Image (cartoon, rainbow, N blue to C red):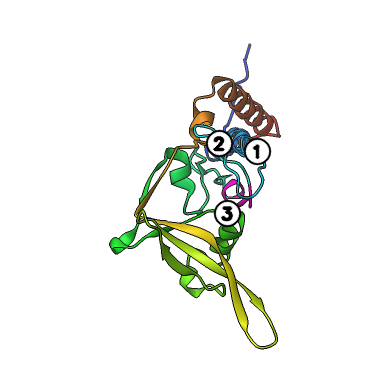
Amino acid sequence: MNVGNVTMTVDTAKLKAKLERAVNTGVYRAALVYEAYIKESMPKTAVGTHSLPGKPPGEQDGILRNGIAASKPKNGKSIISTSKARYAAIMEFGGTIRAKSGKFLPVPLNLEAKRLQKRTDGGLRNSATPLHVVRTKTGRLFLVKHLTRKSKNATKLIGSQMMFILKKSVTIAARPYMRPAEQNAALYVKATDAFEAAVKEVLSKGAA
């Protein structure tokens, strides 16, 4: 009695490619879970207001929030990076900003000043709004805007509005938004579930 041989051939190159695709899809889906959580942790706040120290920063113009993204997966890795906003790191970790070359940092005192600083990207010297340096009796320095009233024959100075206080340094409390996600155990479970579901989905589609 002859027993026939059973031969099974596996295309290892295709199998390897499919496994890599499954893992990359899985890690990307898991990374998207973290990305969504981080973005949702930033509540919308009115321009000129601040979140409490220790809490994620509030969303005002969306630059920081919209810049948070998971990278396309490669070699089983997807990196969630922060935006290119200059303040991204100091929001996360806090710290002290010091003026360069012995100059001063203009710290806005009101919403108008915040908007002016944003329009000029910090370059107040090029502002269309003239600002003047004023020193108080206690030695503090301010940038003020003169308030004027025009008449037919002249422009009369009627007062001044303080716009910025000038400081050598400013300390900003940490408002972490990335680390809380990393430390969230329930979020890790949710991301793991997303990974497993994605891997099964890819592997179940046809032969390797």
Question: Which amino acid type is shown beneath numbered disc 1?
Answer: Pro
Q: Does the magenta segment cover residue 110? A: no
Which residue does the image show at 56% across and 72% down from the upper left? 129
Disc sitting over residue 180 in the figure = none
Estimate the x, y position of residue 165 in percent, counting from the top left: 45, 56
Disc sitting over residue 56 in the figure = 2
Front-lying residue, 67 or 204: 67
Question: Which amino acid type is shown beneath numbered disc 3?
Answer: Asn
- Dot 3: few (<14), some (14–19), or many (≥20) neighbours within 10 Å? few
- Dot 1: few (<14), some (14–19), or many (≥20) neighbours within 10 Å? few
Question: Which amino acid type is shown beneath numbered disc 2?
Answer: Pro
Q: Are marks 2 and 1 in contact (CB under 8 Å)?
A: yes
Estimate the x, y position of residue 7 in percent, counting from the top left: 59, 26
Q: CA distance from mark 2 to mark 3?
A: 22 Å
Give the mark, 2 or 3, whose residue is nearer the N terminus: 2
Which residue does the image show at 50% across and 34% down from the upper left? 53
Q: CA distance from mark 1 to mark 3?
A: 21 Å
Front-lying residue, 44 or 197: 44
Front-lying residue, 51 or 23: 51
**Segment colored magenta:** 60-66
Picture quarter containing residue 55? top right
Reply above or below: 129 against 37: below
Estimate the x, y position of residue 102 in percent, counting from the top left: 29, 61
Q: Secondary structure at mark 3?
A: loop
Q: Secondary structure at mark 1?
A: loop
Which residue was labeled with disc 3? 110
Q: CA distance from mark 2 to mark 1?
A: 8 Å
Reply above or below: 115 against 9: below
Give the mark, 2 or 1, whose residue is nearer the N terminus: 1
Which residue was labeled with disc 1? 43
